[in-house]
Amino acid sequence: MDFASTRDAALARLEAFVETAPRYGRERNFVKPGHPAVSRLSPAIRHRLISEDEVARRVMAAHPFPVVEKFVQEVYWRTYWKSWLSLRPQVWTAFTQDSIPEPARAREVEAGRSGNPIIDRFARELAETGYLHNHARMWVAAWWIHQARLPWQAGARWFFRHLLDADPASNTLSWRWVAGLQTPGKTYLARRSNLETYIDADWLEPLSEGLADFEHPQARLPDSAPREEIRLPELPRLEPDPCLRTGLWIHEEDLSVETLDWDHLAISSIRALGQASAWHIHGASPSRRAWLQAALQDAAQRTSVKWNQPVVMNSPMSLERAVLDWAEECGLEQIVLMRPAPGPLADEWAALQPRLETAGLRVGLRDRGEDLDCRPLARAGFFGFWEKVRDRLQAPGS
Ligand SMILES: Cc1cc2nc3c(=O)[nH]c(=O)nc-3n(C[C@H](O)[C@H](O)[C@H](O)COP(=O)(O)OP(=O)(O)OC[C@H]3O[C@@H](n4cnc5c(N)ncnc54)[C@H](O)[C@@H]3O)c2cc1C
C-alpha cells in the first residue's frame, strides 16, 4: 500500500475518496485487504501535507453534511486529541519520561511471535506497511493491555516507532483510552463477535484459532486514573517582528506552510529541517524515516516555487547547530516556524529556543487560525467539542 507523501498525492487521494465518502459511515469499521472503506490519509494529515479543515471542507462541498458527518467527525478526533494534549502537555511528558522497561514478551509480540495468529498478522502488517486500520489498532491495543497484560506505554512506543502517522496525541491518548486512563472507569475490550463481524471472512478463516483469546475478555483496570488538569490554558505568544531579516524553518509538524499568508514578514531564506535526533531517540522505523524525508523534500520544493528561491532540505542530528549555521550564513536576525504541538519537536524546541535567543536571534511562532479556534474547546469530552466544531464548520461564510 502506498501512503501519499506529497501534497499533490494527498490531494489526489482526497479526490478519489470524496466519491466514496457517503459510504464511510456504514463501511468504515470493516477491516479488508487494502482498506478500501477508509481514506488512508492519516500520514498526510498528521504532518499537515493537507489540513483537517481542508479535508473536511472538500468532502462537505461535495455532499450534504448529514451524509458525510461521520467522516468529518472522525477527522476532528485528531484535532480534539491534539487540542486536549496541548492543554495538558504534562501527559506527553509523563509518557516519554516513563522508565518502564520493555518486557521480553513485548518484543516477541512486536516481532509477530505472540502465539496469537490474528495479533501476529497485525504486527506484520504494521512492520511492513506502517499502517493499521483503526479497528485493528483498537483490537491489538486491547489484547496487549487486557489479555497479554503488558504495559500500555510499551505498546504505545511500539506503534509510535512504526506508524507513518505516528502522532503524539492520537497515539498516546488512544492507548490511554484503551487502558482506562483517558475516560476514568471505561476501558476498551476487544470481543470475539466484534472481530468476526468486521474482519474480512476469507482473511480471518486461516487465523480463526486466534479468536479464542477474545472470547471472554477481562478488563485490567489501572490502579488509579487521576483527572488530568489543564496546565497550559493559554499558549505563550511569540509574535514575529515584521521588520527583521527572517528565516522560515519548515518542519515535519506542518508541511504546507505555503498555504498561509506570509506577506507581512521579510522572509529572506527558507530551510526544511527534519528532526533526525527525535527519529533516533524514538526509534522511527526505516519506512517512517523515508516517508518523512520524502514529505519534507516535497514541502521544500513547493515553498521553493512559491518564494522563488532555492530551499535546502536537511535532517541534521543537531538542530541547534543547523539553525545557528544557517542564520550566520544568511545573515538572519529572526527565525520563524509553525508552533510545534506537544511531541518530540516541542520537547527539543523548549531547549533550543533560549539558546537561539542567547545567540542573538529573535524567534517567532505562528499558529493556524483553526488550531487556535479549536484548542479551547477541548476542555472536556469529545462530543461537546464536536458540537462546537460542527457549528463552526457550518457557519455561513466560514
Ligand atoms: C491504539 C490506537 C493508536 C492510534 N495511533 C494513531 C496515531 O499515532 N496517529 C494517527 O493519526 N491516528 C492514530 N489512531 C487513530 C486512527 O486509528 C487513525 O487515525 C486512522 O486509522 C487512520 O486511518 P485513515 O486515514 O484511513 O482514517 P479515516 O477513517 O479515513 O479517517 C480520516 C481521518 O480522520 C482522523 N481520524 C480517524 N479516526 C481517528 C481517531 N480514532 N483518532 C484520531 N484521528 C482519527 C485521521 O486524521 C484520519 O486520517 C490510533 C488509534 C488507536 C486505537
Image: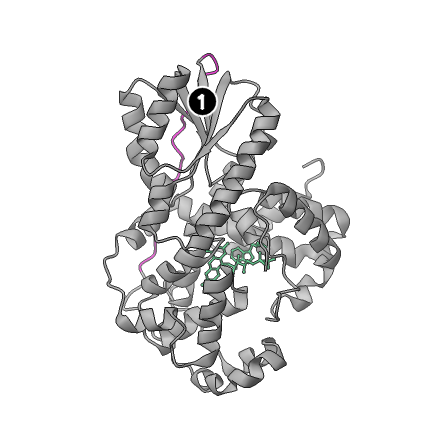
Residue 253 in the image, given as x and y percentages of width and height: 47, 41
Residue reaching furthest top?
A: 243
Residue 33 in the image, given as x and y percentages of width and height: 61, 70
Can residue 164 be seen at all in this image of the molecule? yes
Q: Which residue is drawn at 51% across and 55% down?
A: 382
Quarter of the image where the C terminus is located: top right
- From this view, report whether residue 51 is shown above or below residue 236: below
Q: Give the secondary structure at mark 1.
A: strand
Q: How many marks?
A: 1
Q: Residue at x 48, y 84 (%)?
A: 211
- From this view, report whether residue 9 is shown above or below residue 364: below
Quarter of the image where the N terminus is located: bottom right
Q: Does the magenta stretch include residue 380?
A: no
Q: Does the magenta stretch include residue 229?
A: yes
Q: Please state the extent of the stretch shown in magenta in the rendering.
A: 226-243
Residue position marked by numbered label 1 in the rendering: 247
Examine the residues drawn in magenta and state their main secondary structure. loop
Colour setup of the view: one colour
The type of residue carrying mark 1 is Gly
Horizontal side, residue 222 vs residue 285: left or right? left
Residue 262 in the image, given as x and y percentages of width and height: 55, 23
Q: Which residue is drawn at 53% across and 51% down?
A: 43
- Find residue 73 and report its image quarter: bottom right
- From this view, report whether residue 377 is shown above or below residue 314: below
* Within-10-Å neighbours for mark 1: few <14, some 14–19, many 20+: many
- Find residue 37 and report its image quarter: bottom right
Horizontal side, residue 251 vs residue 66: left or right? left
- From this view, report whether residue 376 is shown above or below residue 258: below
Residue 291 in the image, given as x and y percentages of width and height: 50, 49
Q: Which residue is drawn at 46% across and 82% down?
A: 214
Can residue 187 be seen at all in this image of the molecule? no
